[in-house]
Amino acid sequence: LTDRTVLVTGGLGFVGSHLVDALAPENDVRVLDNCSTGDRAYLHDEATLIEGDIRESADLRRATEGVDLIFHQAAVVSVERSVDAPYETNRTNLEASLELLERAREEDARIVVASSAAVYGHPSELPVEETTPTEPTSPYGVQKLALDQYTRLYHDLYGLETVALRYFNIYGPRQQGPYSGVISTFLEQARAGEPITIEGDGEQTRDFVHVEDVVRANVLAATTDHVGEAFNVGTGDRTSIEELAEVTREATDSSSPITHQEPRPGDIRHSGADISKARRLLGFEPRMGLETGLEKLVARQ
Ligand code: UD2
């Protein structure tokens, strides 16, 4: 991908900042971020920061003027937060996102949006295909599903080049904060010698995908002919939370005890992607297995 005028919303965040790092050397990259959970230190020195909020029309307009490609990564990325505040999180995750789709339509820009495995809720089959019924169990999942469907609709109704990427459980450097995902939580606990807190019996499973693989999926989505589509972005492998706790303890040489707490209300039991569609149509192939990914993560901090 070269010589494009690109907007990355949430470009100071976990996925967004890695995406900006990949694009900034060869493209004209703008970042729209409200610096709430993102970090200015992650801004690539060839990228331009527009400090603003996707919920503000004027900020959206400023950020999208003249762009030909948009990666929409800004969101309130938390299932729990959405359960506490469905209306407030909807403003960002759906309403502002819909306005961004409108702006993409005005600019005739391709838009790649971050959807989520949360759209499937408790999946009715495993691994999950894109055609598996969607029945989210949280406001977050409903918001992402509506965005995902609007993304397709903007292609079908208006001919806009759109792609939705249904992220499974992403991990990697720069994932931080109270809602940051189990891998970064376990790593922090193991390093601090504090108990590693498994919620429930630990037999629940997830498909953990490294952020570098997610970045590559986004770049492929930016050039694919298969627009108006949604793709699962995972690895196809599932790991239990119990196993994750043990592997993390070993990788960090930690003596932290592994403890069990109450399960998370409404927690999804098993989640795993069938990535054949992304393989076939995008040419997506995950490169980083969980053990290598964890070792890299441990080594760099
Ligand atoms: C959901 C989505 C994911 C992404 C994310 C955004 C699914 C299957 N996944 O992730 O795609 O959108 O939301 O937030 O819907 N856990 C512990 N101990 C801890 C922390 C977590 O045992 O200290 C467990 C937790 O109960 C769950 C698993 O680890 O069973 C994963 O939790 P998570 O918060 O990392 O992500 P998850 O699956 O809710």
Image (cartoon, rainbow, N blue to C red):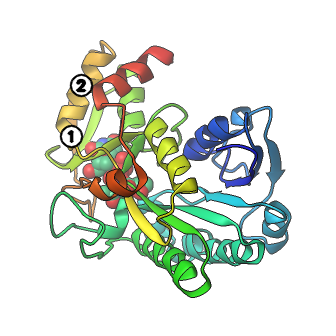
Q: Does the residue at mark 2 contact the one at mark 1 (Cβ under 8 Å)?
A: yes
Q: How crowded is mark 1: few (under 14 residues within 10 Å), some or many (20 or more)?
A: some
Q: Is 75 left or right of 282, judged from the image as shown? A: right
- The numbered dot on residue 255 is none
Q: What element carries label 2?
A: helix
Q: Can residue 237 be seen in this view?
A: yes
Q: Position of residue 118 (x, y in %)?
A: 36, 64
Q: Of marks 2 and 1, which one's residue comes earlier in the chain?
A: 1
Q: Which of 127 and 296 is in front in this view?
A: 127
- Mark 2 to mark 1: distance in Å? 10 Å
Ligand 1 is within 8 Å of the C-beta of the residue at disc 1: no
Q: Position of residue 288 (x, y in %)?
A: 36, 31
Q: Residues within 10 Å of mark 2 (few under 14, many from 20)?
A: some
Q: Name the residue under label 2.
A: 247
The picture quadrant where one finds residue 287 is top left
Residue at (60% x, 42% y) in the render: 19
Amino acid at the residue labelled 2 = Val
Residue at (68% x, 51% y) in the render: 36
**Measured along the vertical axis of the image, is residue 257 above or below residue 161?**
above
Residue at (78% x, 40% y) in the render: 47
**Measured along the vertical axis of the image, is residue 129 above or below residue 176?**
below
Q: Name the residue under label 1.
A: 239
Q: Is residue 233 visible?
A: no
Q: Is 186 left or right of 12, judged from the image as shown? A: left
Residue at (58% x, 55% y) in the render: 222
Q: Where is residue 221 in the image (x, y as percent from the top left)?
A: 51, 55
Amino acid at the residue labelled 1 = Thr
Q: Is 134 left or right of 283, judged from the image as shown? A: left
Q: Where is residue 159 in the image (x, y as percent from the top left)?
A: 60, 80
Q: Which of marks 2 and 1 is in front?
A: 1
Q: Quadrant of the N terminus?
A: top right
